[in-house]
Image: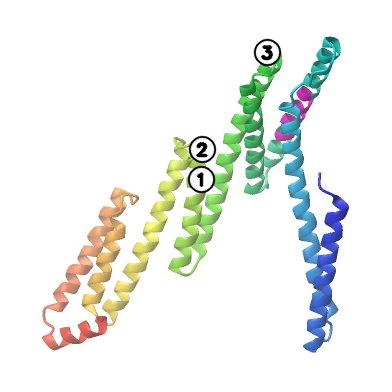
Amino acid sequence: MPSSAGYLTAAIVIAAGLFFLLWWMLVRSGDEAPWLPAGLAASVVLLVALSAREVVMRRAWNRYLLDNGINQKPTTSHSAHSGSRSRNQKKGFSASLHSAALRTIQKQSTAADLPGSTSEAHLEVAHLCHEYLSSTDEAVRSGSLGSEKGIAIRAGQERVRALHKHHLLTWARGHSRALTYEAQQRARTFDKIETANKALECIDSVMRVYPNEPELQESKIAIGEFIASVKVAHWVELAERSAFKGHYRRAIDRYRDALFYLNQDVVKTEVRTAGTEKIERQIAELQSRLKPLQPARHDKEFREDQ
C-alpha cells in the first residue's frame, strides 16, 4: 500500500504552491482580494487529490483481496504435518476472502440498483465483477483448488456473471440515453452528431462483450436513425434556404444530399418512403421553375455556386 502521509504531504505542497503562485499573480494584476480565488483553486486541487486517492485505493484494495486471497498458493515446510496444517489455514483464509469479495460486490450491486443512483455506479460494479471473474478464472485454471472450494468459486462466478451482465447493460442503457438526450438539446448539427456518436460508441463497447443482446441492437438502430435524421434535416434546411434565395440548382443538389442520408439502411422503410416522396416532389417543383429562366440567370447562379 502506498504511503498515505507521503501522498497527503505532496498534495498539500502542490496546493500551497498553487495558492501562493495565484496570489502573487493576482496581487501584481491589482486584484483587491487575491487570497479568495487563490484559496478556492488550492482547495479544489486538494479536494480532487483526496477524492482520486479514495477511488484508486478502494479499487486497489478489492484487487488485493481477490489476488492474494483466491490465488494464494500454499507453501511447503520441513515437516508434512506442519505443511498440511499451513495449507488448511491458507485454504480457510482464501475462502473467507473469497466470501468477503463476493459480499462486497453484492452490497455495491444493491446500492447501484437503488432509485436515484447514477449510471457510473453500475459501471463500477461491472468493473468489480470483471476483476473478480478474471482472478477466479486464473485460480480455477491453476488446478490448486480443492473440490469443495472449486464448487463454491464456480457458484460465485455464476452469480457474478449475472451481476456483470445486468450492471453493464444498465450502464449502457442509462449512459447512451443521457448522451442521446444531450445530442437532441444541442443547437449545431455537428455537436448533435458528435454527441450521438459517443452514445453509439458506448453501445458498441458493450456489444463486444454481449454481441447478441437484443436491447443493445435496438439501441444502436435507434441512435443510427437519429444521426441520419439530423443529417437529413440539415441538408433539407440548406436546400430550403437556397430555394428561398432563388438558387434552385443549389437547392436541388442539397435535396439530393438529403436523399443520400435518407436512403441509408438504418432508416425505417416507412420513414424512408415518405421522406423520399416529399423530397422528390420538392426537386420536381424546383426543376419546373428552372425551365423558364434565361441562360444568363443560369450562368449567374453557377458562378455563385462556385
Q: How many marks?
A: 3
Q: Which residue is drawn at 46% across and 46% down?
A: 219
Which of the image's four quarters has the N terminus? Answer: top right
Label 3 or label 2, whichever comes before in sequence order: 3
Q: Residue at x 77, y 24 (%)?
A: 94
Residue 276, percent from left and from top: 25, 58
Provide the residue span drawn in magenta. 94-105
Q: Which of marks 3 and 1 is in front?
A: 3
Gap in angstroms between the C-alphas marked 3 and 2:
30 Å
Q: Do the residues labelled 3 and 1 touch (CB within 8 Å)?
A: no
The local secondary structure at tag 3 comes to helix
Residue position marked by numbered label 3 in the rendering? 147
Q: What residue type is labelled 1?
A: Ser
The secondary structure that most of the magenta stretch takes on is helix
Residue 35, percent from left and from top: 85, 78
Q: Residue 205 carries which label?
A: 1
Residue position marked by numbered label 2 in the rendering? 209
In the image, 139: left or right of 251? right
Q: Residue at x 42, y 49 (%)?
A: 222
Q: Are marks 1 and 2 in contact (CB under 8 Å)?
A: yes
The local secondary structure at tag 1 comes to helix
Residue 108 in which image quadrant: top right
Gap in angstroms between the C-alphas marked 1 and 2:
7 Å
Q: Residue at x 56, y 50 (%)?
A: 175
Mark 1 crowdedness (10 Å alpha carbons): few <14, some 14-19, many ≥20: few
Mark 3 crowdedness (10 Å alpha carbons): few <14, some 14-19, many ≥20: few
The local secondary structure at tag 2 comes to loop
